[in-house]
Image (cartoon, rainbow, N blue to C red):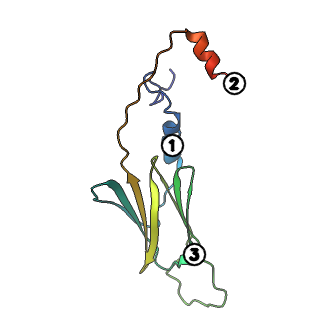
Amino acid sequence: MSRMAPFSSPLMLGFDEIEQLVERIGKSQSDGYPPYNIERIATDSHLMLRITLAVAGFSENDLEITVEARQLHIRGRQGEEDNREYLHRGIAMRQFHRAFVLADGMDIAGADLKDGILGIDLVRHTPEPTAKRIDISTQGRDAVTDRRRPT
């Protein structure tokens, strides 16, 4: 018995990227650190989201936010201080990496760090609905194929 892919319907054309995104999300590991919230911010003209991460102990220089291949990456790295001698160490100096897959058209509006809370604002403007008329050729399939072929 073969496995049926969720996007294998002959009526769903060009959804290969979405299937790959779903697989990438399934493979990503998350240990729950740092804790985060995602909230929707109501506006009239567009969708806004805010990702909030609890990053106590991290400075602006310890954090890195990048977008690569429609994926938002948030990394935190703290350096060890060699000149400290701890009698008890209950606060771990952990590194972390959080990744979020972004939809098409989703942009980063900005990021801020205040009181150990990192906030990242995302925005997606609602596109105007469009309709496009497709002309039908009466020259046959070979003429259409020849038009697409580079010379």
The residue carrying pointer 3 sits among few (fewer than 14), some (14 to 19) or many (20 or more) residues within 10 Å by Cα, namely: some
**Marks 1 and 2, how far apart at CA:** 32 Å
> What's the residue type where badge 1 is placed?
Leu
**Could you say where residue 29 lies in the image, as x and y percent from the top left?**
52, 54
Q: Is residue 118 left or right of residue 139?
A: left
**Could you say where residue 66 lies in the image, as x and y percent from the top left?**
56, 61
* Mark in front: 1 vs 2: 2
Q: Is residue 68 left or right of residue 49?
A: right
Query: Which residue is tagged 1?
Result: 21
Residue shown at 66%/91% (left/top)?
83
Specify the quadrant of the image occupied by residue 38: bottom left
In the image, residue 41 above or below residue 114 = above
The residue carrying pointer 1 sits among few (fewer than 14), some (14 to 19) or many (20 or more) residues within 10 Å by Cα, namely: some
**Could you say where residue 117 lies in the image, as x and y percent from the top left?**
42, 74
Give SS at disc 2.
loop
Mark 3 or mark 2, which has the lower sequence index?
3
Residue shown at 38%/52% (left/top)?
125
Query: Which residue is tagged 3?
Result: 62
Query: Which residue is tagged 2?
Result: 150
**Marks 1 and 3, how far apart at CA:** 28 Å
